[in-house]
Image: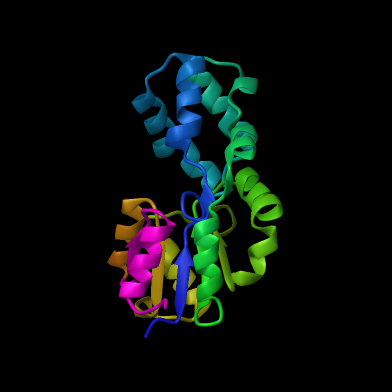
Amino acid sequence: MIKCILFDIGGVIVDFYNEEDYYPYLVKVSGKPFARIRRMINDDIRIDIDKGTKTQRFFDSQVANQLGIRVEQVRWYDFYKRKSKLINGTIDVIKRLSGSYKLGYLSNTDRSRYTYTVEKILKPYLNLFDYRFASCDIRLRKPDAAVYKYALHAMSLRAGEVVFIDNQIENVAGANRVGMKAIWFRGSRNLEKRLKRMEMLS
């Protein structure tokens, strides 16, 4: 029996994609290939700030050094602040689920973006979330099995009692591997259909 639904934040609740917004900007200012920029940030530098083991200043200096740009051109936080916005369709689904299930979020996010998200974007809706797990707080990051197990332990729930929703297929697969039911987010309308098929939403 499903008791809880966990949502990713970026790309599921908040509309912002590094691939569509931020990385193309870095391509423009650095002249470096998109694939190199994505790999450099996702596989190396970003992991540390998402886990809260390195600061935003460290991230900015590393990106600047590796791309040959000025630190003030990195604009990791500023770009998110300017471009991110709520996905209203997902919030509508969350409101409809509230009261029937425990709800929460489980997100890979650094301190600067997470603070802005909570204080400026999600603030009116934080009461909808019974559980709040951010990688920069718990120092664990999807798709490592440890992050899902951490959340399960904190919620006192078994894996089979949780549905996890994420727009990154590798994070969906990570949740599946620990026994959670998982949905690959392909838009709020598709999510609504999936939940109705699972008889979790009327």
Q: Where is residue 63 in the image (x, y as percent from the top left)?
A: 52, 26
Residue 8 within the magenta-colored segment of the rendering: no
Q: Where is residue 167 in the image (x, y as percent from the top left)?
A: 39, 52
Q: Where is residue 149 in the image (x, y as percent from the top left)?
A: 42, 69
Most extreme residue toward the bottom is 1
Quadrant of res 164: bottom left
Residue 188 within the magenta-colored segment of the rendering: yes
From the viewer's side, name the closer residue of 190 and 159.
190
Q: Quadrant of the N terminus?
A: bottom left
From the viewer's side, name the closer residue of 172 and 193.
193
Q: In this view, does 169 lie above or below 106?
A: above
* Residue at horizontal 55 percent and vertical 76 percent from the top: 98
Relative horizontal placement of residue 198, taking residue 120 as reference (left or right): left
Q: Position of residue 202 (x, y in %)?
A: 42, 78
From the viewer's side, name the closer residue of 86 and 118.
86
Range of magenta residues: 179-202
* Residue at horizontal 47 percent and vertical 63 percent from the top: 7
Quadrant of res 41: top left
Q: Visible in this render: residue 145?
A: no
Relative horizontal placement of residue 139, taking residue 42 as reference (left or right): right
Q: Is residue 71 above or below residue 185?
A: above
* Residue at horizontal 40 percent and vertical 57 percent from the top: 166
Tally of marks: 0
